[in-house]
Amino acid sequence: MELQLRLQRPTFTLDVDLHLPSQGVSALFGPSGCGKTTLLRAVAGLERAHPGRVAVHGQVWQDDAQGVWRPTHERALGYVFQEASLFHHLSVRRNIEYGLNRTPAARRQIALEQAVDLLGIAPLLERATETLSGGERQRVAIARALATSPRVLLMDEPLAALDMARKAEVLPYLERLPRELDMPILYVSHATDEVARLASHLVLLRDGKVQAQGDPAELMGALDLPLAQGDAAATIVAGTVQAHDLEDHLTTIAFPGGQLQLVSTRQRPVGQAVRLRVQARDVSLTLSPQTGTSILNAVPAQVVALREDSPGQIMVGLEAGTTRLLARITQRSARTLCLTPGMHVVAQVKGIALLD
């Protein structure tokens, strides 16, 4: 997907030149007002960039140099907003059929049944939309967007209006989409937990410009970028399920730097790929393995960088094998341990603190 867009706004100028993967989830991340939604609307043709070029799977939707402009209704896209915006006079089934019926038969690639199955909404089909929970409404909205057989799915903070319980309900369905659909997903968010779970490619925006882009695990662990700063700083650990202890509800995850045990009631198959989010505030450091401790996880690591995070606090960049970790510790602790780049330490993480 090629996006070359320049668009003037009162507080910033959107100016990006992006070549994004044709599969998976590309997340647009940044603070409010940095241009994430403006970029999405420009891709959809709801805003016109000057100059601009938008090409998806080789199909050109805008190219000012060649005089090409396709209006929104001629762009094969699905758009999911913060609010579900369902048709309240139609049932769930008829909402999804609306998306299906506005797509020419020759271009239909996603059947109604497939969209329903992907979002787990078969039991809801005959329900009136006003009887649905927030999470159910958003799943129906996503199914309706998929029923148009889009070349690209645009999602503008689709979980922002949901509480934590409803958000947890929807996230597993969002994880399924890139595994089962051959289309790029452009996903706007300012929530690090969503980026950690969903993104295969990450674009950091600031004041309308691309600050950095690439592998989410690398960008989240880079001390010179905003994701590795503050109380919400976290890194991604990609691994596979090694074992599950039913009695203690502990799942063991093997990753290139060792293994981690986390508390989980979900019994996953051995060998299943998983992504864990390890928050920097939940990682402590010691110079040697400890005994007589309640902390389950002790991972050998090497210090690669240190940076002041806030007065009295230091963010420590670590490498455990090929996996990046962060530890947010006090300045006094860093001084007491005499931490310097190249040192070998042990990163300790509570099993109850790991997020999957």
Image (cartoon, rainbow, N blue to C red):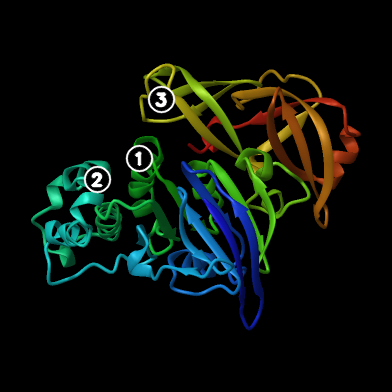
Residue that mark 3 sits on: 249
Between disc 1 and disc 3, the foreground one is: 1
Number of the label disc, if any, that sits on residue 110: 2
Residue at 62% over, 40% down: 215
Residue that mark 1 sits on: 181
Work out whether residue 204 or residue 23 is closer to the camera in this orientation and state it.
23
Q: CA distance from mark 2 to mark 3?
A: 38 Å
Residue kind at label 1, given as amino acid type = Leu
Left or right of residue 299: residue 129: left
Residue at 66% over, 20% down: 292
Residue at the outermost front position: 66
**Label 2 residue SS:** loop
Q: Quadrant of residue 83?
A: bottom left
**Label 3 residue SS:** loop
Q: Position of residue 263 (x, y in %)?
A: 46, 30
Residue at 56% over, 58% down: 3
Q: Earlier in the sequence, mark 1 or mark 3?
A: 1
Q: Position of residue 31 (x, y in %)?
A: 61, 65
Residue kind at label 3, given as amino acid type = His
Q: Is residue 209 above or below residue 323?
A: below
Q: Quadrant of residue 89?
A: bottom left
Marks 2/1 in contact by CB < 8 Å: the verdict is yes
